[in-house]
Image (cartoon, rainbow, N blue to C red):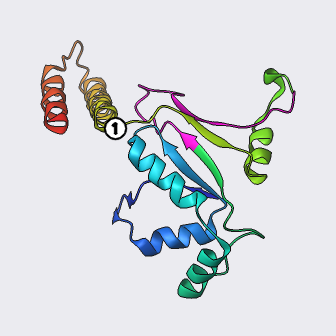
């Protein structure tokens, strides 16, 4: 089980209790996210790497939850691009040892084994407001494009243009960046 490094969710802000429970229950945590700033990623990494048996015992008592694993203060850490827009694929990633195996013979099982052994390390790019703004605008545009395409097919229209969507996206991007 793993969780993202962001301190919020679709239903609103995650509370400190949510984060503490995730620390108790998750063996693997994302500490580098390609759309988050270096500062946020490094803060998350420091938090996870500084866990101690005493910290986990205190959290377990507070939440009445038995921590997962034999050494729950030792977490596997990973990185990911969070690239839902397709603009920055693979720019942020998770490294793991290959033990001399040829790259073409590696499988997802090798990665899972490395996570279970806590032998992974995050690497690659950090993000920031511009990365996030580009992704949001791309997703908005893609959604509008797909919605318009479905409407065109339904109405047998051909050759629709998307100037309105582009203008909205550009204004939205300027608003986020400024």
Q: Is residue 142 magenta?
A: no
Q: Is residue 74 above or below residue 163?
A: below
Which residue is disc 1 drawn over?
128
For residue 128, which quarter of the picture?
top left
Q: Secondary structure at mark 1?
A: loop
User: In which quadrant is the C terminus drawn?
Assistant: top left
**Crowd tier of the residue under label 1, counting other residues whose Cα lies within 10 Å: few below 14, some 14–19, many 20 or above:** some
User: Which quadrant of the rendered structure holds the N terminus?
Assistant: bottom right
Against 111, residue 156 (above or below) is above
On the rendered structure, is 87 left or right of 155?
Answer: right
Question: What residue is rendered at 48% in x and 68% in y?
Answer: 19
- The extreme top residue here reads 159
Q: Is residue 24 visible?
A: yes
Q: In the displayed structure, would residue 124 be above or below residue 79?
A: above
Q: Closer to the camera, 170 or 151? A: 170
* Image position of 39 (left or right of 152): right
**Image label count:** 1
Q: Position of residue 177 (x, y in %)?
A: 19, 34
- State which quadrant residue 24 falls in: bottom right
Image location (x, y in percent) of residue 82 = 47, 39
Q: Residue at x 77, y 45 (%)?
A: 114
Q: Where is residue 131? Give x, y as percent.
A: 34, 32
In the rendered image, the residue lying farthest to the right is: 100
Residues in magenta, as a range = 79-100
Q: Nearer the viewer, residue 160 or 57?
A: 57
Locate residue 152 relative to residue 77 in the image: left or right: left
Residue 169 position in % (x across, y down) = 19, 30
Q: Considering the whole magenta stretch, tell me its main secondary structure.
A: loop
- For the point 45% across and 75% down, the residue is 17
Residue 4 can be seen, yes or no:
no
Q: Is residue 87 magenta?
A: yes
Q: Residue at x 62, y 63 (%)?
A: 26
């Amino acid at each position: 089980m793993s969780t993202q490094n962001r301190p919020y969710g679709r239903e609103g802000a995650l509370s400190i209790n949510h984060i503490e429970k995730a620390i108790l229950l998750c063996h693997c945590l994302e500490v580098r996210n390609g759309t988050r700033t270096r500062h946020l990623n490094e803060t998350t990494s420091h938090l996870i790497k500084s866990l101690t048996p005493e910290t986990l015992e205190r959290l377990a008592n507070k939440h009445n939850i038995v921590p997962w694993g034999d050494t729950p203060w030792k977490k596997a850490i990973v990185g990911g691009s969070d690239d839902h827009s397709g603009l920055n694929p693979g720019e942020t990633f998770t490294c793991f040892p290959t033990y001399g195996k040829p790259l073409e013979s590696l499988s997802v099982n090798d990665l899972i084994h490395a996570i279970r052994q806590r032998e992974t390390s995050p690497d690659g790019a950090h993000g920031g407001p511009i990365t996030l703004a580009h992704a949001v605008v791309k997703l908005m545009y893609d959604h509008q494009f797909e919605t318009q395409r479905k409407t065109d097919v339904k109405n047998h229209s051909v050759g629709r243009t998307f100037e309105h969507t582009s203008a909205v996206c550009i204004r939205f991007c300027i608003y986020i960046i400024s």
